[in-house]
Image (tube, rainbow, N blue to C red):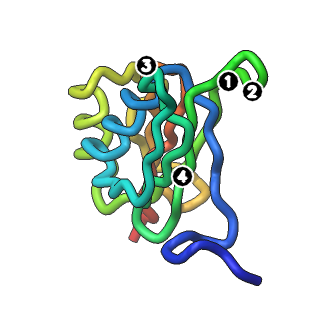
Amino acid sequence: MTQREGHSTVSVYMMAFEAPRIIDFIEDVFGGQTLIRQNRDDGSVLHASIRIGDSVVMISDGTDHFPSFPVWLHVYVGDVDAVYAKALEHGAESVQKPEDNADGDRRGGVRDSAGNTWWIASALP
């Protein structure tokens, strides 16, 4: 199998509304690192790859041919409560406050400005 350097075997691809704003959200809240960013002539995002931890999220602004739509993502972080609070500070809306779950994770959820839901979790000790 061959993939682009720095990319995981499977990556989420988001067709987002206001992709530049979501890229900033990923960088600010999750410490994401933009690996690639290509803009269209009108300034919208044609393609971007952003690394979060050991994974890559790909994103593009939606078009008439490929419309934007919200997705759900699950992200493991070191401190659920801190990242949840940071997401709210960056304009996200709470979906669920962090809580311990029977599946062994502490998890909370937020919705970003494009309607994507981010489930933020850490494994319980």
Contact? badges 2 and 4 (CB < 8 Å): no
Question: Which of marks 1 and 4 precedes in the sequence?
Answer: 4
Q: Which of 81 and 77 is in front in this view?
A: 77
User: Which kind of residue does numbered mark 3 sit on?
Assistant: Ser
Contact? badges 3 and 2 (CB < 8 Å): no
Image quarter (top left, top right, bottom left or bottom right) of the N terminus: bottom right
At x 29%, y 43%, the residue is 29
Relative to 80, is 8 on the left or the right?
Answer: right
User: Spatial distance from mark 3 to mark 2, Cα to Cα?
Assistant: 19 Å
Contact? badges 1 and 2 (CB < 8 Å): no
Front disc: 3 or 2: 2
Q: Is residue 22 above or below residue 28?
A: above
User: Spatial distance from mark 4 to mark 3, Cα to Cα?
Assistant: 17 Å
Please name the residue that numbered disc 1 is placed on.
69
Question: Which of marks 4 and 2 precedes in the sequence?
Answer: 4
Residue 112: percent from left, percent from top: 44, 25
User: Which kind of residue does numbered mark 4 sit on?
Assistant: Val
Please name the residue that numbered disc 3 is placed on.
113
Q: Is residue 34 above or below residue 39?
A: below
Residue farthest front in this picture: 41
At x 47%, y 71%, the residue is 54
User: Spatial distance from mark 2 to mark 4, Cα to Cα?
Assistant: 17 Å
User: Which kind of residue does numbered mark 1 sit on?
Assistant: Phe
At x 57%, y 36%, the residue is 60
Which disc number belongs to residue 57?
A: 4
Which disc number belongs to residue 66?
A: 2
Question: Which of marks 2 and 3 precedes in the sequence?
Answer: 2
Image quarter (top left, top right, bottom left or bottom right) of the C terminus: bottom left
